[in-house]
Amino acid sequence: MAYSDKVIDHYSNPRNVGTLDKSKKSVGTGLVGAPECGDVMRLQIEVDENHMITDAKFKTFGCGSAIASSSLATEWLKGKSIDDALTIDNMDIVEELALPPVKIHCSVLAEDAIKSAINDYRVKNGMEAIELEKSHH
Amino acid sequence: MLKTPIYLDNNATTPMDPRVLEAMLPYFTEKFGNAASRNHPFGWVAEEGVDYAREQVAKLIGATEKEIIFTSGATESDNLAIKGVYEMYKDKGNHIITLTTEHKAVLDACKHLEKLGANITYLDVESDGLVDLNKLEAAMTDQTILVAIMYANNEIGVIQPVKEISAIAHKYGALYFTDAVQAVGKIPVDVIADGIDLLALSAHKMYGPKGVGALYVRRKNPRVKVTSQMDGGGHERGMRSGTLNVPGIVGLGKACELCYNEMAEEAVRLSALRDKLESSLTVLEESYVNGNANHRLPHTANISFKYVEGEGLMMAMKDMAVSSGSACTSASLEPSYVLKSLGLSDDLAHSSIRFGLGRFSTEEEVDFAIENTMKAVNHLRELSPLWEMFKEGIDLDSIEWAEH
């Protein structure tokens, strides 16, 4: 199976690799997946007082498509409000990266990581957690 | 000058040796006859080629030429051996013993027989990949007609104690079949000394063509019979009908002859390269060699690089072909069942890479592989949240992972 050019691009030059200080109130962290399943994503966002995402970082243990999905997610998150960020759908990632059906779970994981990071930020800042639909898995 | 990509997946298949191709070529054109045509020279010439190949194959494994049945490959040989023995001997008993680490062709043939009333024992292996002989003996019953245990494993290369296995099988009146696809042509295999009753081999794993293999079926002490699984013209002493693939068979014969002449020297060279590869790569922190280090094929190394995922790793190992126990591409997302049988945790199985050296591997290629692999592992660990946690001293088992 060949990878799409966009997967290879994100995989070879991953954007926004790194770690934010998760103890900061302005940072939301999402850690999803499991080592046994061969995929773990950690996605972090830094949010300003207007609920705008000013920075996003990731680290991912997984295949090329998982790494590319999380790299793409960080690109899309920057500059969005936390409400707008919730509208990112896994199928947008599938389309952008041209993921084949066997790799759809990588995009699902990225969507879960986004929502989980936003929720972490919301709870830290006295907002209610958004109900996460338990989908796809 | 190094030519890339380099091929280090010789357990999957091998390139054909040019000398094999040369031997085969006339049998596509001027020597095109049907080996079963008894009444004209075209048939005789083809038959001569087949007869000679039968001798070459027999010589490599210490058999006689009448004991070699040509097939389309090892999958067919595995099926013919297991289903053929069951059909022939099921009045004597319905019990077959095999291993959880066998090739799918063996496991699925056994599963098929289970539906027909066979009782199959799937023995687990020890953490080094070897069968525990006491457990094997304990599993034997008076109903056991066949022990099906591979010679060497395709993923980790461990070599089973075949002499001891055959002795146990025979002590209880059972036959011993071995899938020897990975072993024949790489290490000495002798059906007499090893006590083997049936043996499957394949041409394309030893520098021959794809689509041809053989099943050894013992003729003396005891005389073994299998019920044919392909009915027709009664070729191959009635055990495998179908017009013989003469060029393929000639190629298999030539491949066997070359292995017979060259494998001793080749094994010394390849095990030195393999050791270099392994000792260089295990310098990396948290890397582990899978399988017994002493009883192993000379050309195979299977290494887990903890905290990186195998498929992602292969993608980073640019310009080289290897394989991984990670099954990220398969629909099941299950990692290698062989590595799991060793008791490896799923995350280590997902992190494994198999390096398979071969006749045409060079030291330059191995050096390239070492450098490339180290770079890739380090790169992916920079990206790995698990590696970061490990470095911070966080116990990954203490985290409640959301299984998906």
Image (cartoon, helix red, strand yellow):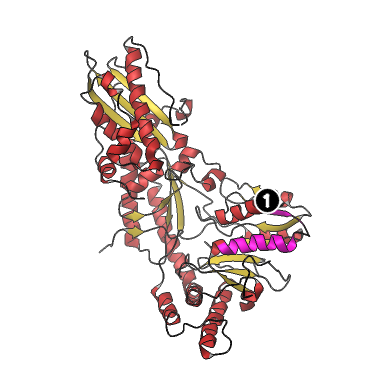
The residue marked by circle 1 belongs to what chain?
Answer: B
Query: Residue A39: image x %, image y %?
Result: 41, 35
Give the quadrant of residue A62: top left
Give the quadrant of residue A92: top left
A48 relative to B349, above or below: above
Query: Residue B31: image x %, image y %?
Result: 46, 84
Residue at horizontal 35 percent and vertical 13 percent from the top: A123
Side (left or right) of B62 relative to B306: right
Pick the front one: B6 or B333? B333
The residue that label 1 is drawn on is B114
Residue at horizontal 38 percent and vertical 40 percent from the top: A103
Viewer can see residue B7: yes
Dot 1 lies on which element? helix
Query: Residue A11: image x %, image y %?
Result: 28, 41
Q: Looking at this rendering, what residue extends furthest in the top direction?
A: A126
Residue at horizontal 39 percent and vertical 74 percent from the top: B18
B193 relative to B305, above or below: below
Viewer can see residue B342: no
Query: Residue A21: image x %, image y %?
Result: 29, 21
Q: Is residue B83 magenta?
A: yes
B72 relative to B402, above or below: below
Pick the front one: B345 or B26? B26
Q: Is residue B55 magenta?
A: no
- Segment colored magenta: B76-97
**Kind of residue at badge 1:** Glu
